[in-house]
Image (tube, helix red, strand yellow):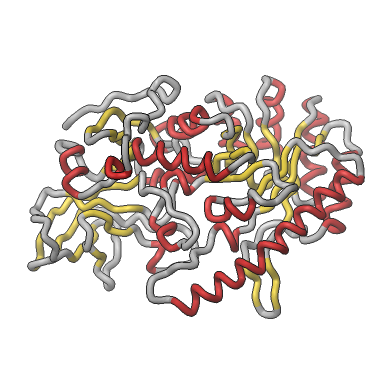
Amino acid sequence: MLEPQRLDAATQPFGAQSVTSAADLVRDYAYYRRAFAGQRMPFAFLDLDLFDANIRQVAERAGEKRVRVASKSVRSVWALQRILAADERFIGVMCLTAREAVYLTNRGVGDVLIGYPCSAEADVADVARATQAGGHITLMVDDLTQVERIEAVAREQNVRLPLCLDIDLSLDLPGLHFGAWRSPLRSAEQARPIVKRILASDHLALDGVMGYEAQIAGVGDNYPGQAAKNAIVRALKRRSVGMVAERRAAVVAMIRSLGGELRFVNGGGSGSMMTTRAEDAVTELTVGSAFYSPALFDNYRAIRFLPAAGFAVEIVRRPSPGRYTCLGGGYVASGAPGADRLPQPYLPPGARLDPLEGAGETQTPVSYSGAEPLAIGDPIFFRHAKAGEMCERFTRLLLVSHGQVVGEATTYRGDGQCFL
């Protein structure tokens, strides 16, 4: 087996400067089979040429807004550092837990926002100690109980902790909640008591405001064979855009009327960059999935990034003509159960899952009748339905550029970390 070298994201050149045309970014089965010859399967990989092209596209789409990288969609410190070093618009990370925030701070990430509330004393105490050591970690709140628990720890640790107020941006219609069930704060008036409580504290600071328009950023609207559903989703998205901007602006105006000074106003996701960046109140966009571009993002009409990450499983059986059984591969994505949560055969083109077996923990049958000759021992290349979740099943990412493996990068799992 070939043994790739681990690379330093800070010194490894930000690639694709040598990519001269769109043709240089075309990938087929033969390209990856040659590049990964000799590697033991299963393995996960990151195509640096496509990854870097996605990074550049995100920076361009952000316009004058800053970008905060969603770590859950990356889950590799090496990859996070490569993104952050690529453009001055990438200013920090949004993670999920206090332990992850402290871990990233200790690995050199300078501006970390925790995307979900954490009020457990031990977690807040860890953040307080990291803050005393010079880190900048912002805690998320949407309830007075969370604020009071954080304040108690901050007072005990004699530190001032920055907080971010999370507001709900879902669209509520009769009989329909279009969006994610997140914050209970759906108006400026609902948020006012929490804002006043934070501003009155000597041990807390209101650092920012965020809202995630999940119904715009996280819902596909271009599924094959679902024209009626796609049309409904697009209409709901259009209706959501104005509501989202109005609600976010109202909360920001309320905070400023109380004398609050915000360091940032965060919004968006990979699927809503263009609408979110148009909001005057927003100062930064959260982007994650765009960097790897998983299979779910093939079902969006308005965006198209390059499939930079994937994994390979080995053909170990050929039970009948045109049917190949692979070992492993059942890396199913979170969310409402459905076929779109399964990993998708990517290369060779035309390979497809068996509808009765799907992708399994021990075996994944694949049907294929194309021109590419396949044999026992050959790889089938898959894309995960979501971006970073693939990294929970692998300890490393093989890094490929210009047709060859040039190194490897550890995932969170490879670093011995498991945060959720």
Q: Quadrant of the N terminus?
A: top left
Please give left or right for residue 275 compared with residue 172 in the image. left
Residue 420 visible somewhere in the drawing: no
Residue 57 vs residue 120, the one in the foreground: 57
- Residue 129 on image: x %, y %: 69, 25
**Compared with residue 304, is residue 54 higher up or lower down, i.e. above or below?**
above
- Residue 333 on image: x %, y %: 42, 57
Count of marks overlaid on the render: 0
Which residue is outermost to the front? 21
Please give left or right for residue 150 compared with residue 49 in the image. right
- Residue 290 on image: x %, y %: 47, 47
Residue 65 visible somewhere in the drawing: yes
Please give left or right for residue 49 compared with residue 168 in the image. left
Name the residue at 37% across, 53% down. 384
Residue 49 vs residue 147, the one in the foreground: 49
- Residue 62 on image: x %, y %: 58, 43
Quarter-of-image position of residue 237? bottom right
Residue 139 vs residue 276, the one in the foreground: 276
Please give left or right for residue 306 compared with residue 39 in the image. right
Name the residue at 37% across, 30% down. 17
Name the residue at 72% across, 44% down. 265
Quarter-of-image position of residue 318? bottom left
**Compared with residue 155, is residue 71 higher up or lower down, i.e. above or below?**
below
Name the residue at 8% across, 67% down. 321
